[in-house]
Amino acid sequence: MAAGVVPASVTAYASSRLRFLGARLERARRRERVRACARFQPRTGERSSRVPRVFADAGSGSDVPASGSSKLPSQKIPPLYVKRTVRSSTVRHPGTIVVMGDVDAESSVIAGGDVFVWGSLRGSVIAGQGGDYKAKVSALDMRPSSLQIGSVKGNVKRGADGDPVLKASGVPETATVEPTSRQRLLVQPASAAAAELSRRADVGLAKSQRVTSAAVRRAAYFTGIYIAAAGVALMVAPDPVFSLLVFGVLCVAFGVYYFGTAYGDGKGLGARAFYLSTVVGRVFIFASFLFMVACGLFKEPGLLILGVINLLGALAMMFALSKKKTA
């Protein structure tokens, strides 16, 4: 037999052994896959708790039907994925709902679990409908018309004029139930990165709210000071006249408005500075009119009524400004 030549019988034997070992290896792999699947699949006759994910396509109806069994805990029910913007419709599901789009103001989302909106949330949303206080509502733009988690309802974001907020928040936010009291909802940035983004946005907003020209603030300071000074001069006149005295009080209040607004604007308070100034000015009007009537300078009951009206207005404004930013 020549050197380096392998007999044909040896080659055939080696090939058959390789095919045999390959077949055994393939059967072993199949058995391993079967055992792996058995750990996740129910036995024969049992009800499967793993249901394929449910998607609502863009062509589905306006009212998305619930899937799964409502008797199961919401954590074990597969999430419902709504791959469209919800417009003028209601989406219900006993588990978690994920909306891959916006939720318009005329729409509502009702879930037994969490609610995630990968877009703008402008409609009504209820999470944890079965009383799950640990449920969450998250959105890239959180501006719901109404918000409820479990049985806890939250206040809707409003602007300074009381109307719904029209500008997007620009920061992903998450609403949860306060764990201690379970009586109010907390809306916070969804993550540390979102919190930092929110902080930078607030700083930028405060800077943008300032009057760009310092000369305008100086003019407001000057106007407020001379109007207030004229009012004080009328109030301390040796021969007080009713009309001039009342006008002096109003001049001082107007001076407070000018001065306080300019000062607050320089601090980045924006319109809030004017509202705070009106509180101080109205309290001053009440105190001045009360002093006039109490000291017998002018026995005018209408003056006291006018002072009380200004006091009530100041208290209402102060209460509105002191409200915390909670949902």
Image (cartoon, grey):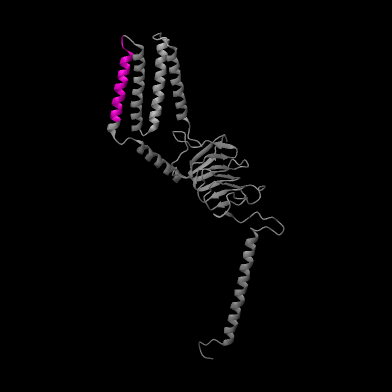
Q: Quadrant of the N terminus?
A: bottom right
- Residue range highlighted in magenta: 217-238
Which residue appears at 44% of the width and 46% of the height? 193
Residue 148 seen anywhere in this rendered image of the structure: yes
Which residue appears at 28% of the width and 25% of the height? 222
- Which of these two is toward me, 253 or 49? 253
Which residue appears at 36% of the width and 21% of the height? 253
| Drawn side of residue 191 relative to residue 41, left or right | left
- Which of these two is toward me, 219 or 170? 219
Residue 205 lies within the magenta run:
no
Q: Position of residue 70 (x, y in %)?
A: 65, 47
Name the residue furthest bottom. 1
Which residue appears at 36% of the width and 19% of the height? 250
Q: Position of residue 113 (x, y in %)?
A: 59, 46
Q: Position of residue 312 (x, y in %)?
A: 46, 22
Q: Main secondary structure of the magenta part?
A: helix
Position of 43 relative to 94 (above/below): below
Residue 269 seen anywhere in this rendered image of the structure: no
Q: How many discs mark residues in the rendered view?
A: 0
Q: Position of residue 251 (x, y in %)?
A: 34, 20
